[in-house]
Image: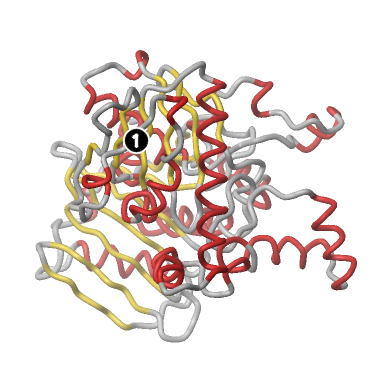
Amino acid sequence: MKILVINSGSSSLKYQLIDMDTESVVAKGNCERIGIEGSKLTHKAKGKEVVIEKPMPDHNVAVQLVLKELTDKEAGVISSMKEIDAVGHRVVASGEAFKKPTLVTDEAMVLMEEIKDLAPLHNPAAIVGVKACQAAMPGTPMVLVFDTGFHFTMPDYAYMYAVDYAHYEKYKIRRYGAHGTSHKFVSQEAAKYLGKKPEELKIITCHLGNGSSITAVNGGKCVDTSMGFTPLAGVPMGTRSGDIDYAAAEYIARKEGMDVSEMLTYLNKKCGMLGVSGVSSDFRDLTAAAAAGNDRARLALDMFNYACKKYVGAYAAAMNGVDCIVFTAGVGENTPGVRKGICENMQYLGLEIDEEKNNEKNNGAIRDITGKNSKVKVLIIPTNEELVIARETMELL
């Protein structure tokens, strides 16, 4: 069985064709600058890379180009579109409308339209991607897989905000979280690596990248997560502020003459590591700048590590212990200084990392950086969100 995984952005469309018999990637690629001048498709298959620079005025054209490459005599990997058994679509926000992966139907698409403003940059693009695939592959089953899905096991006292309950009932204002497919994948992989069932473990998963979230996984289920109603909440990120006193945001807005929309753009795009450091949102740049003596870059990294450390401590308290801490995603997998900054001075948890192993270069495999005397396992696990989407798509067929 072959499943095509689609991740539609506002001006991009990433894809992977996965052979579910071996769970291997047969082909993958990315359509960039859709609807913008200079659009191109980068297609990787059979150990080769093909770059096609061609106008893509919309997602319909992009999907047609992707399918053409997948079935191309030279660059292709399938003889016809009939070999694609199903399509799994990544969707960022679900609201309470969808609590699990859902087959694409007319009714499901009506609900998708109703919740698209929960993630205005991502959900409308997902809708466009679904419709483009439906037009190109009529009759092929399609599934919506939500970033928020894994987090719906949180208890009400963890996901509710202390706002007027009427606003929860009316607008479904609550914690939804994000990166759910990643947190699910790495927590399951950690259990496999440790030779235990997920039900036997208390795991804290740290998905750290330009966007970062931390999740408490107790017995294989999410019981709390750092992101909130949107991905703005939690630890400070590349350009997002993370948790902030809302009165401080209002004060800045009033002084700077910003409206609500402008303030949200400010908090999402101009704060975080970029705002504090004045250098970059990229942790590689920050690490280099801090090493060269840039004190604001040092401050930004210290703030990030400290915020993550607090969440780790809070989630250990919430679960009454922790058996394993997992680092994943771009920063989590590739930045030894961040892992060290989060894990140091955590002796009260019995947590210790092996500094030599922590400093080893990322080899793409699971790495155990647990210290000799540590009571808590510390693992680096590469995430694979596309595989989770493919697995959950297959389960619905």
User: What colour scheme has been applied to the protein in the rendered image?
Assistant: secondary structure
* Above/below status of 384 relative to 102: below
SS type, badge 1:
helix
Q: Nearer the viewer, residue 245 or 291?
A: 291
> Is 374 positioned to the left or the right of 58 in the image?
left
Q: Position of residue 74 (x, y in %)?
A: 9, 70
Q: Residues within 10 Å of mark 1 (few under 14, many from 20)?
A: many
Q: Return the residue nearer the eye: 15 or 62.
A: 15
Reading the image, the residue beneath label 1 is 185
Q: Is residue 365 left or right of residue 337?
A: left
Q: Position of residue 277 (x, y in %)?
A: 57, 69
Rendering quarter of residue 271: bottom right
Residue at the image position 28 percent from the left and 54 percent from the top: 16
If the image is split into quadrants, where does the N terminus sit?
top left
Q: Residue at x 58, y 74 (%)?
A: 278
Instruction: Quadrant for the C terminus, please.
Output: top left
Q: What percent of the width, then of the height, locates residue 56?
A: 42, 77
Residue 321: x %, y % from top left: 46, 19
Q: Residue at x 22, y 49 (%)?
A: 82
Q: How many marks?
A: 1
Vertical order, 182 against 221 (above or below): below
- The answer to whether 253 appears left or right of 378 in the picture is right
Looking at this view, is 322 or 79 the one in front? 322
**Depicted 12 relative to depicted 87: above or below:** below
Query: As drawn, which residue projects farthest toward the bottom?
Result: 37
Looking at the picture, which amino acid does disc 1 mark? Phe
Q: Quadrant of residue 45 in the image?
A: bottom left
In this rendered view, identify the residue nearer to me: 182 or 246.
Answer: 246
Describe residue 128's horizontal placement relative to residue 228 as left or right. Answer: left
